[in-house]
Every structure is written in C-alpha cells, then in structure tokens.
Image (tube, rainbow, N blue to C red):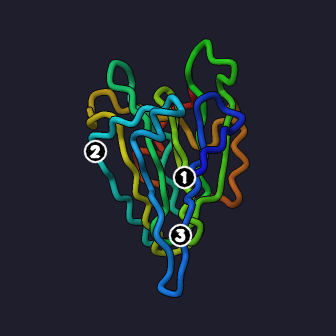
Amino acid sequence: MIFRPTPLEGVWIVDLEPHTDERGFFARAFCAREFAGHGLDAAFVQCNLSRNRRRGTLRGLHWQAPPREEAKLVRVVRGAIFDAVVDIRPGSPTFRQAFTLRLEDESGRALYVPRGCAHGFLTLEDDTDVFYLMSDFFAPELARGARWDDPAFAIPWPEPPRYISPRDQAHPPFAG
C-alpha cells in the first residue's frame, strides 16, 4: 500500500500496490502493521456497506461524538463518489477545513478519516457501493451531523445533491 498525506492533519489517501498478470491483479487493501507504522488507528471493529441506487445521493456530513469517536477507512467497491472530510477537532491546525477526493472502484483508492472528522459523500454514478471499516461500534446516542452545504466548510460539491435523507436535510450548521 502507498500512503499519501493530505492537507488535513491525519487524513490519508491509501493507494493499492497491485501485482498484475493476465488474470487481473492482487493487492492488499488493509494491513494493520502498515497502518500502525504510519501512526494510524488500525483497530477496526465494524465494517459497513452503503448501497446507493442513484447518482446524486448525498450521505453526510456525519461523525460520532466523544467518547466513541470513530476513524474510518472508506473505499468504493462499485461506482464512484465525491468524498468530503471536514476537520472538526478544536485546536487542530486544520480546524473547519475540508478535503475532497473522487473515489471510484476502478482505482481501489481508499481514504483514511481519523477520529474527530466529519465525513460525507455524493454518489457520481448509479448503483454505487461504499465499503468502510470503523474503529468503534455505532452508538446512536452519539451520532452527530452538520449540513452538507454549510458555508463554514466551503465544500466544492461537483453538483447539487438530488437525494438526501430527511435526517441529513435536518442537520444544523456546524456549531463548533
């Protein structure tokens, strides 16, 4: 795996190193030792799959509050997304800054989102599946969210979302 830092503290792009032959390729998608070697939380306890039938589906911005903050490793296994991470850690040098990245199944690229960051995505194709590893169990009472279009974050979404859950539509602007 190839680890590339991003402008946001603790957010990493993780690229595959495929071994290719006439059959296709083989690549490690996760290695706890390599993640730990980069100082990343590698103790994932839950895997999630987000199936999205329609292009223009928005999910986020979400995070889990202390004491159950979550790190995530996000990968698209079918389709493509515009992925967005916002640093909401008070005291962080990149507080309130956003990082965005296109993730698609063809590249196998993943994004590591550390604890204390909000995360969301917009599907860019119909029938997009997003698979992600979580470092803590879901605690509904600690689930939090902020508006996807909060001007404080200035996320450059490539197109307006067409499908948003009532829950995500009701998120307030970020108050931190």
Residue sitting at x 46%, y 29%: 115
In percent of width and height, residue 141 lies at: 27, 28
Location of the C terminus (image quadrant): top right
Distance CA(mark 1)–CA(mark 2) = 21 Å
Mark 1 vs mark 2: give the one in front.
Answer: 1
- Residues at circles 1 and 2 in contact by the CB criterion of under 8 Å: no
Label 3, residues with CA under 10 Å away: few <14, some 14-19, many ≥20: few
55 in relation to 34, above or below: below
Q: Nearer the viewer, residue 157 or 14?
A: 14
| Mark before the other along the chain sequence, 3 or 2 | 3
* Amino acid on which disc 2 is placed: Gln
Distance CA(mark 1)–CA(mark 3) = 11 Å
Q: Which mark is residue 46?
A: 2
In screen coordinates, is 148 left or right of 7?
left
Label 1, residues with CA under 10 Å away: few <14, some 14-19, many ≥20: some
Mark 1 vs mark 3: give the one in front.
Answer: 3
Q: Which residue is mark 1?
A: 1
Residue sitting at x 58%, y 30%: 10
Q: Is label 3 in a helix, a strand or a loop?
A: strand
Q: Is label 1 in a helix, a strand or a loop?
A: loop
| Mark before the other along the chain sequence, 1 or 2 | 1
Residue sitting at x 69%, y 18%: 93
Residue sitting at x 39%, y 32%: 70
* Amino acid on which disc 1 is placed: Met
Distance CA(mark 3)–CA(mark 2) = 28 Å
Mark 3 vs mark 2: give the one in front.
Answer: 3
